[in-house]
Image (tube, rainbow, N blue to C red):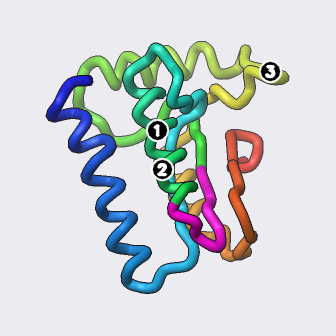
Amino acid sequence: MKREPFKVDFIYQLEIVKKYQRSGAKHISLISAVGADPNSWNYYLKIKGMLEREIIKLGFESTNIFRPGHLLGNKFRLDIRLADLASFIVDPFLHGSFKKFRSISAKKLSAFVVNDKEKKEAINYFEFNDFI
């Protein structure tokens, strides 16, 4: 694993969640990624999956995991802007089981997370169809 990105993408986030739990938190929400899997060959999806797994092990009363596709937003890197453009072209063709891969604006996703006031017990996963 690449050491610095691993620290940022996994270790720091997990430590923050542990501190949050020690402060008395009983519920946690995590924005992950569609396709997150600790066994993935893709670095990003592997780390997201590992983080989900470790947070679930902490045993919060409820764990809400939001798995968006590509996040659209105010990003200034060329590669991200190109991904935004590709999403604009491809998204309308993603139907059925592929619909979960559609992009969503960071603003719309964050509004869904904040407004999801229902405290669901156990572990809950949310994907594109839940956000719209």
Instruction: Name the side, left or right, on which 68 lies relative to 10.
Output: right
- In the image shown, does 1 or 31 lie closer to the viewer? 1
Q: Which residues are magenta?
A: 58-65
Measure the alpha-carbon separation of dots 2 and 3.
31 Å
Q: Is residue 60 magenta?
A: yes
* Residue 103 seen in this snapshot: no
Residue position for label 2: 54
- In the image shown, does 131 or 28 lie closer to the viewer? 28
Which of the labelled discs sits on residue 50, or is there none? 1
For mark 3, give the secondary structure: loop
For mark 1, give the secondary structure: helix
Residue in the picture at 58% in, 62% down: 113
Residue position for label 3: 95
Q: Position of residue 4 (x, y in %)?
A: 15, 34
Label 3: few (<14), some (14–19) or many (≥20) C-alpha neighbours in 10 Å: few
Residue in the picture at 69% in, 48% down: 126
